[in-house]
Amino acid sequence: GLKFGSDFRTTCDFSKNSISKSDAQIFLQSGFFREVILLYSHTLNDESNQKLTVSGNVVRRKLLRSIFILSAQCQLLGKYAARVPELTNIIFSDSYRETNSFDHIMWCALLSKYTSTNQGPRLRMKGVVLKSSNDLQLECMSASV
């Protein structure tokens, strides 16, 4: 369990129901976690793609919630999610913030602890700008007002 006085951000095993670091490594090494993130981000329902039904949108919300829970349970997965531009571009978009304000605040709070200036290399896509930890914290604060 969680010990008081310890750095909870470096501990993956919060409870018996939490994901272990070795399980998280398997999710990453197998590509499963990346595939779940890409499944969510590549099924975006925009004006040009009206194929998603109400049930499709429910599935997308469940996928995003699963990504959030896995990222919150283990720092390894959270750090990975924070570095995937396809996911962060959606989460920090104005349209997502306007329609999902609570989830947006939760994502800002979670990802702000995983993004820092001294962190290793980030996954990058041409033309994509990832926000810094300070920017995420400011956005989180302004969204809650």
Image (tube, rainbow, N blue to C red):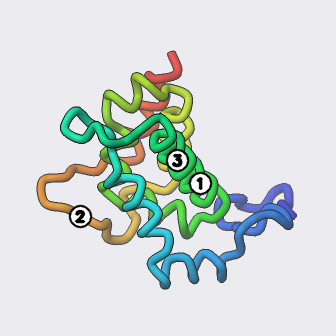
Q: Amino acid at mark 1?
A: Ser
Residue depicted at x 36% and y 57%:
117
Q: Quadrant of residue 34?
A: bottom left
Element marked by disc 2: loop
Task: State left or right for residue 3 relative to residue 117.
Answer: right
Neighbor class of circle 2 (other Cα within 10 Å; few <14, some 14-19, many 20+) is few
Q: Amino acid at mark 3?
A: Val
Above or below for 84 versus 92:
below
Element marked by disc 1: helix
Lower sequence index among marks 2 and 3: 3
Residue depicted at x 47% and y 31%:
140
Residue placed under numbered mark 2 in the picture = 124
Residue 47 in percent (x, y) is at 22, 32
Q: Residue furthest left?
A: 127
Residues at badges 2 and 1 in contact (C-beta under 8 Å)? no
Q: Nearer the viewer, residue 25 or 7?
A: 25
Element marked by disc 3: helix
